[in-house]
Image (cartoon, rainbow, N blue to C red):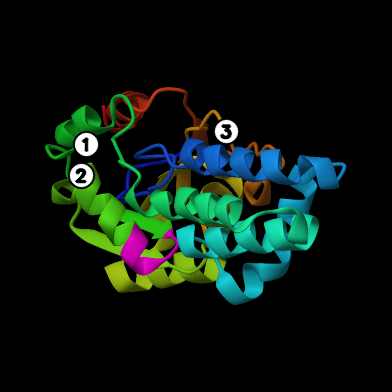
Amino acid sequence: MINLNNLRVIAFDADDTLWDCQSHFEAVENHLYRLIAPYCETPSKELFLTESGNMADLGYGCKAFTISIIETALRVAGDHLSAAELSDLLADSKSLLHLPATPLPEVEATLQRLQAYPYRLVVFTKGELQDQENKLRRSGLAKYFSHVEITSDKTEVEFQQLCQHLDILPSQLLMVGNSLKSDIAPALTIGASAIHIPFHVTWQLEHFEDIEHERLVKISHFNEILQILNYHTA
């Protein structure tokens, strides 16, 4: 059971926590897989290989993903693909820059309710700055947050920096997110609490072993956050 008595800040991941992102990316991945399937045994492994190799230089986000998609197509299928096929794949990838960022069920209603709670609400997400800012704007949720922090990665270092920027102790932070690797594990490591709300699809590079921890609560519906806060503050 987590102790929220000293809680001051609730931080929310963005992609696949506040809105659907990965489903749109998977649609583009499937486009790639259809093109390269005749030329390799496991298309998904080929993309994973490319993304893993590019991670140190390109990081996370739509632009990095697009480069990896095109690079994989060229590496695996090469001259077998026409200019028109590559152009369509590029256009499909770039369309991710305009994905709707529609809030997931119960998200906005819960954030509205949380305005009455004595906690500061912030967004803490990783990815490409302009892309993440645009998604937050399109979602219509920016008005609920007093602080937005977008980083190139989310490790213990970035979580410590977030606490420093907000002038809080790690024990005063509650992180809410869908990724055990990026949202939950590093938060718990620095001494924060966490709420895990899994999304129905997970990016290959975010796969992580399950975690059990006294400062971690797992939920299946976003509005369960209110029940947790009510229980611990009653």
Above-or-below relation of 133 to 175: below
Checking the image for residue 141, the label placed there is 2
Query: How far across and down, in percent of the image, does residue 219 sit?
Result: 47, 26
Query: How far across and down, in percent of the image, does residue 25 sit?
Result: 52, 44
Nearer to us of marks 1 and 2 is: 2
Q: Look at mark 3 in the image and give the residue it sits on.
A: 201
Q: Look at mark 1 in the image and give the residue it sits on.
A: 111
Tag 1: amino acid: Leu
Query: How far across and down, in percent of the image, does residue 198 sit?
Result: 52, 32
Task: Look at 50% across and 35% down and name the residue there.
Answer: 23
Q: Earlier in the sequence, mark 1 or mark 2?
A: 1
Task: Look at 46% across and 47% down and name the residue there.
Answer: 193
Task: Look at 69% across and 44% down and name the residue there.
Answer: 35
Report helix, strand or loop for mark 1: helix
Mark 3 and 2 residues: CB-CB less than 8 Å, in contact? no
Q: Calculate the distance from the C-alpha at mark 1 to the C-alpha at mark 2.
A: 8 Å
